[in-house]
Image (spheres, rainbow, N blue to C red):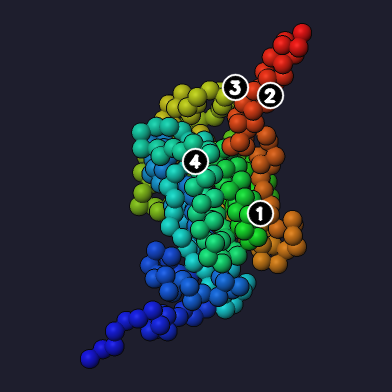
Amino acid sequence: MSEPITPQTEAASSSLGAGHILQLKEMSFLQVNSLDRERTAVLFAVSPLEEHGPHLPLGTDVFTAEFFTLELAHRILISKPGWTVVIGPTVSLGASVFDAPGTLRARPRTLRNLALDYGASLARHGFRYIFVINGHAGPFHVVALEEAAAAVSRRYGVRMLSVSGPVLWRFLRGHFQNRLEPLLGRPLTREEGRALRGDTHAGCWETSLLLLIRPDLVNDAYATLPQVTFTLQQAARKNYPLRLGNQMGYIGAPAAARAELGIAARKILSDAAWQVACPVFEGPDRAWQQTSFLYKIPFLRTGFPYVLGTAGLILLGWMLARLIVL
């Protein structure tokens, strides 16, 4: 006759050894409670379902974020033997998205609050090292996650970091191009160089990554799609990628995509993400919490409309008071 399961017996039988990558949704609360908080990192992804042209799935940003979540998990375990990494469920919502059918859009403040509450739930139960991974470079999306990470870190005295903001925008602006040719072992062709300029959405880079991560979901028609570019004036228009070129919702040159470019991008992005994440464990205060340059732009902050509204009310009240006095 087997013994009844009690909190004590389950805790004893479910105590987890270090050096594992675990899925939070598969664990009992006693297993979670048995983790050494000083030697555990928690990772979760926040990326939207969003249109990515006629050749890539709506979940392109989700698949990318989840892939690099595992990449970072392995980096942590290599760097810190004996640690445990817990991966939380992915949140498939986003801000600054192209709102075509199938896109799951959230307001920036909603996204910020969701990521903040997610991180706070972990922090309240003692987890000190929390990482948000994101595969979507939409400006309001990036800043909302960085705001949430900063708020949780400040309120609970933990270290929560949105890893992807400093990486994605540097990558899209070509800051890692000097690493590409050494990784490929050859110079870029003229066509490849032209394809990578202005490649921002479902173009060469994202298609190459999906050819590596989920080739089964890449439509072979990508090889026939013409390059689509945009100007800053066009970028200011609503749903601009759907109004450009062939109106198929991508920006860049999908036809230039190759699996070997995806392998190179994997190495570049994994290395860059680790450089951003590593100081969380050992960096001094205020030196570990890196952000994108977007975080410093006031109107991208989720509280900016409220600040403007409050300032307007104060100004209106001052003007009315002046009129009464006069």
Q: Would you call the spot at circle 2 few (<14 residues within 10 Å), some (14-19), or many (20 or more)? A: few
Q: Position of residue 109 (x, y in %)?
A: 53, 39
Kind of residue sitting beneath label 1: Arg
Direction from residue 72 to residue 13 in the image, left or right? left
Q: CA distance from mark 2 to mark 4?
A: 26 Å
Q: Nearer the viewer, mark 3 or mark 1?
A: 1
For residue 314, the mark is 2
Q: Quadrant of residue 74?
A: bottom right
Q: Quadrant of residue 53?
A: top left
**What's the residue at 63%, 54% (across, down)?**
155
Find disc 1 in the rendering and name its residue.
154
Q: Are marks 3 and 4 in contact (CB under 8 Å)?
A: no
Q: Position of residue 123 (x, y in %)?
A: 56, 61
**What's the residue at 36%, 49% (across, down)?**
217
Kind of residue sitting beneath label 4: Thr
Q: CA distance from mark 2 to mark 1?
A: 28 Å
Find disc 4 in the rendering and name its residue.
110
Q: Nearer the viewer, mark 2 or mark 4?
A: 2
Q: Would you call the spot at circle 1 few (<14 residues within 10 Å), some (14-19), or many (20 or more)? A: few
For residue 233, the mark is 3
**175 over 26 or under it: above or below:** above
